[in-house]
Image (spheres, grey):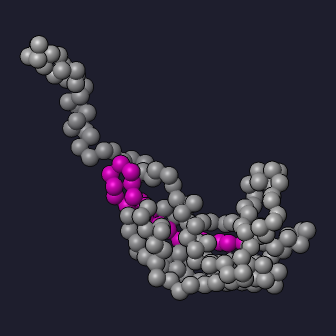
Amino acid sequence: MPRRVVIDSLAFAREGGSLHGELPVAGLARLLDALSDSGGSIVYRLRGLTGPRNEPRLFLEVDGALIVRCQRCLEGIVHPVGIRSLLELVGDEKEPTQEEIEDDAKDFLVAEKELDVVALIEEELILALPVAPRHEDCALPDAGDRLGETESVSPFAALAGLKGKLG
């Protein structure tokens, strides 16, 4: 399990803090269910900054590769990761406007005194996973054999034969 990294998100952003490191994929427990293999590692960099109106922000970069499971053949697929997230920190009392919510250039994150950076990275990785990954040239196992059979014999032909026996 990776070492826990905790920051005060508002102080980190206002002071222009910077963190970087490498996380083993095997230590990201919530992510493992979606993967075919837990090998490898993810490289991250987190920077604190302030926006044009002095609003606190975090800029997260995550790079690496994950081995996701093909939904057809269940074999592994290398899924490259290149996350760039601008997270504007908000307090519990401030609700973002509809215009701000619709702006895809940034996301909002509730400011925390003890923000778990590894959990934040894991959340971003989960959100970046493909919904139903597949190889581009993947076929179902034995699909070629069954394809020829289904073209020549209708599945309803067997039912028609049973119809006379049941009555």
Q: Is residue 124 above or below residue 162?
A: below
Dividing the picture into quadrants, the one containing residue 38 is bottom left
Q: For the view shown, which residue lies furthest in the front direction? A: 93
Q: Is residue 104 above or below residue 58?
A: above
Residue shown at the point (45%, 72%) measured from the top left: 29
Q: On the picture, is 102 further left or further right than 115?
A: right
What percent of the width, then of the height, locates residue 53? Answer: 91, 68
95, 106: nearer the viewer = 95
Residue shown at the point (43%, 76%) measured from the top left: 26
Is residue 113 visible in this depiction of the protein? yes
Is residue 68 shown in magenta?
yes
Q: For the view shown, which residue lies furthest in the right direction? A: 53
Q: Is residue 93 above or below residue 17?
A: above
Dividing the picture into quadrants, the one containing residue 166 is top left
- Which stretch appears magenta? 59-78
Residue shown at the point (39%, 51%) measured from the top left: 71
Q: Which quarter of the rendering shows the C terminus?
A: top left
Main SS of the magenta segment? strand
What percent of the width, then of the height, locates residue 16? Answer: 79, 82
Q: On the picture, is 102 further left or further right than 52?
A: left
Q: Is residue 9 above or below residue 110?
A: below
Q: On the picture, is 2 further left or further right than 110?
A: left
What percent of the width, then of the height, locates residue 22? Answer: 55, 81
129, 76: nearer the viewer = 129
162, 130: nearer the viewer = 162
Is residue 97 shown in magenta?
no
Dividing the picture into quadrants, the one containing residue 9 is bottom right
